[in-house]
Amino acid sequence: MSPDRLRRAAEQMRALDVDALLIGPGADLRYLSGYAALPLERMTLLVARADDIHTLIVPELERPRAEAMDLPDDLEVRDFAETQDPVDLVASACAPLGPSPRLGVGDRLWATFLLAIQHALPTRASYLPASTVTRELRMRKGPEEIDALRRAGQAIDRVHARVPGLLRPGRTEAAVGADIADLILAEGHEQVSFVIVGSGPNGASPHHELSDRALEPGDAVVVDIGGTLDGYGSDCTRDYLVGHAPLGYMDIHATLEAAQQAACDIAAPGVTAEAVDAAARDVLDEAGLGGYFIHRTGHGIGLEEHEEPYIVAGNELPLEPTMTFSIEPGVYLPDRFGMRIEDIVVVTHDGIERLNTGERRPVPAG
């Protein structure tokens, strides 16, 4: 973990007139402190202040685990016993902020903790999402983060290279998915985040759950898989064929390939997120397929599978070097088949680098 993240967070807080962040378990906590805390009924909370005084509050029984992490030197760890109220420690850490502090609350902090904290803090305190601060930091990846995403992308590419050997008529989506999950772990991921195997008409559901449907000759199969490696996510979708392609499939897929390429071609510093979405959508619209593209073109990725920036209409955010996100247009024909091509990319100084490099055309099984 980069040692200056808390310092940069404090700078961002001062720029936005935020006095402190209250961060519970999740990606923001891991990003700022290096601590992958368990989401327990016992409170774990980082109080990160704009004056560069930071406190990590943990249950006493979790303190050894927290201190075993690579915590920043300027982070004080305070613990509470089983019968103590941790809210008192939060109030103490926030007391120097005065009677009307402006506090950024972790987007996923449990309501039961936040309500108790609000009751204990001054009534004139005001609250806003902590992502107001952290999104600006996490959207721009450091070299070590991009290296981790690159390794994750290469590992998931190796899994996709072995998928054709798993696709045989008679095998169920669930059986194929179990094998893929094993391969994700075998290729170095710490955990499997998701496995989508959408065969035949099931491929027309972008977030299809694994089922007992058996693969049949003539099936198109959408395989979208990802996990975490060194704490960072992989996410890649490819399309496969069991035997011959369905009627019209290859022509539609060629259009989808052109749509994804158009989005990749335009993505560069200064280009807006919505312009990348429009580049893919325009190709599909021109071919009469726009109505079958039913989701955004991409999402950011890092410590979380989905994070800023989102590549979607209405997002006028200009892209910057070191931003990382997916480019994944899809076409979904109800009751027939679906298809999606997804690569993770990182914005460079003059374009993008694709972190997934496997075959993007439909790959035959076997």
Image (tube, grey):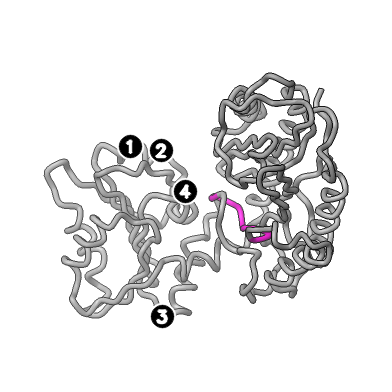
Q: Which residue is labeled 3 in the image?
A: 17
Q: Quadrant of residue 217?
A: top right
Q: Which residue is labeled 2 in the image?
A: 68
**Residue 118 point in image, percent of width and height:** 21, 67
Question: Does residue 356 lie above or below 114 as drawn?
Answer: above
In reply to whether residue 235 is colored magenta, the answer given is no
Question: Does residue 262 lie above or below 218 as drawn?
Answer: below
Identity of the amino acid at label 3?
Answer: Asp
Whole-angstrom CA distance, mark 3 to mark 4, is 25 Å
Whole-angstrom CA distance, mark 2 to mark 1, is 6 Å
Magenta-tinted stretch: 296-304
Q: Which residue is labeled 1 in the image?
A: 64
Whole-angstrom CA distance, mark 1 to mark 4, is 14 Å
The structure residue drawn at horizontal position 30% and vertical position 42%, both measured from the top left corner, is 40
Secondary structure under badge 2? loop
User: Do the numbered discs 2 and 3 sit on residues whose CB atoms are within 8 Å?
Assistant: no
The structure residue drawn at horizontal position 63% and vertical position 39%, both measured from the top left corner, is 202
